[in-house]
Amino acid sequence: MAKLTVRDLDVRGKRVFMRVDYNVPLEEKDGQMVITDATRIVETLPTLKLLIEKGAKLILAAHLGRPKGKRESSMSLRPVAAKLQELVGVPVQFVDDCIGEKVEKAASALKEGQILLLENVRYYNEEEANDPAFAEKLAKVADVYVNDAFGAAHRAHASTEGVARVVAKRGGKCAAGLLMERELKFLGDELENPARPFVVILGGAKVSDKIKVIDRLLEKANTILIGGAMAYTFKLAHGDKVGKSLVEPEHKQTALDAEAKAKKLGVNFQLPTDFVVATPVDTGKLNKKGKPVMDFTNIQTVKGNIPDDAEGFGAGEETAKHYAQIISEAKTILWNGPMGMFEDPRFAASTNIVARAVADATQKGAKSIIGGGDSVKALNKAKLGDKVTFMSTGGGASLEFLEGAVLPGVAALSDK
Ligand code: ADP
Ligand code: MG
């Protein structure tokens, strides 16, 4: 059922409690915490501007990092308030708590079109526990609830779910922000009745991470293109050797079942036919996290068996070009998971070829939807992020949503 959005709301003079995703990367510089990437703040501006225009009194709640119930000063949202004020162009007040008298006072002093940012909700353990009493306390300043934090919607926390329930119980409205609305539209509605051919590209590390998505999309897609380390489990299931590649032998049957289902449903299910492999060698050095730094020698493309001392790091060019051909004929494209270890340029070719094909198909009129944190990174790295129809901001939430799960933060919003 369609959810109420901020467009549908009459909020003049009302206190709008809005959950945002301001979990931005911070770095310490000269004793100060500095925001190194403000994308998440910028992304909320359309919703904020609309609500300001509509005369709302805005109270923003967010989490930052994992303070685990403690007041961790390095995870304060104070620097975000300053940045937001600079970006949104209206005064943004900050209060160093998210519940209590201070918050209530600051909220009641708000005028129409003004913004108050609350301190990190995860300074309280009750947030992640979705404690009902804590949700009541948060809801004290909420006439209306808005959720624009899709990336946190798969968690039933007090600020993503509990407050909405309290507001709804009082007869208040709970609506999606514009960012959330776009996520629901592209990852949800657009994939319900996709223009065909509908081509799904699935890669990433593990079959076990993606099997629910594979299973659900087998019922909708015309073609599924498999890439990434996930392919090695399929390969192993077919009796091929995979050398030192990342595999899940316990999921061989899962892989075979997926192929059988594809056959039954008439889905064109493609696996890579060539692989870029390399021999890993320990450099003897440790990285910042204390893990051994590996180097790779003897990088080569192989078909069939992967040599015993080699590890696969992605699909080969033959595969990528074949996939690109199929993608060029698609009308709807969903991509989740890179084709290989794209972070290393030596193994990024197949991911980049596929990214280019998706961008070109979009140019020709296909709708392209990208879900998954690393897939978005790969596309941005290839400088093609603005050449696709939609890139999810959701990471883990987008994967769960694509699996067909009901996200608690979405379920809590009012129906239209
Ligand atoms: P997403 O975040 O888009 O859902 P995943 O998290 O499932 O994607 O997978 C991304 C990760 O999988 C990347 O960091 C990439 O390096 C890794 N990966 C993909 N293919 C391989 C491979 N062949 N070997 C090792 N790692 C791989
Ligand atoms: Mg990932």
Image: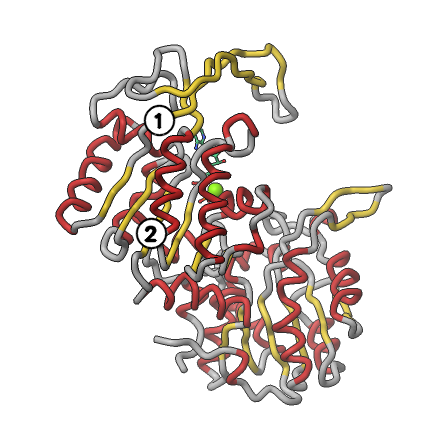
Name the quadrant where ligand 1 sits.
Answer: top left
Q: CA distance from mark 1 to mark 2?
A: 20 Å
Q: Position of residue 106 (x, y in %)?
A: 74, 76
User: In this rendering, would 241 be left or right of 201?
Assistant: left
Q: Is residue 279 above or below residue 351?
A: above
Secondary structure of the residue carrying numbered label 2: strand
Circle 1 residue:
274
State the residue at coordinates (49%, 82%): 173
Q: Residues within 10 Å of mark 1 (few under 14, many from 20)?
A: many
State the residue at coordinates (33%, 64%): 195
User: In this rendering, would 50 be left or right of 239?
Assistant: right
State the residue at coordinates (65%, 83%): 56
* Closest to the observer, 194 or 228: 194
State the residue at coordinates (30%, 60%): 196
Q: Amino acid at mark 1?
A: Asp
- Quadrant housing the N terminus: bottom left
Q: Residue furthest left?
A: 264
Q: Position of residue 277 (x, y in %)?
A: 43, 20
Whether residue 396 appears in this view of the structure is no
Label 1 close to label 2 by CB (< 8 Å): no
Q: Residues within 10 Å of mark 2 (few under 14, many from 20)?
A: many
User: In this rendering, would 361 be left or right of 260?
Assistant: right
- Quadrant housing the C terminus: bottom left
Secondary structure of the residue carrying numbered label 1: loop
Q: Position of residue 389 (x, y in %)?
A: 49, 60
* Closest to the observer, 21 or 231: 231
Whether residue 307 appears in this view of the structure is yes
Circle 2 residue:
199
Q: Is residue 333 above or below residue 319?
A: below
Quarter location, residue 28: top right
Disc 2 within 8 angstroms of ligand 1 (CB): no
Q: Is residue 47 above or below residue 183?
A: below
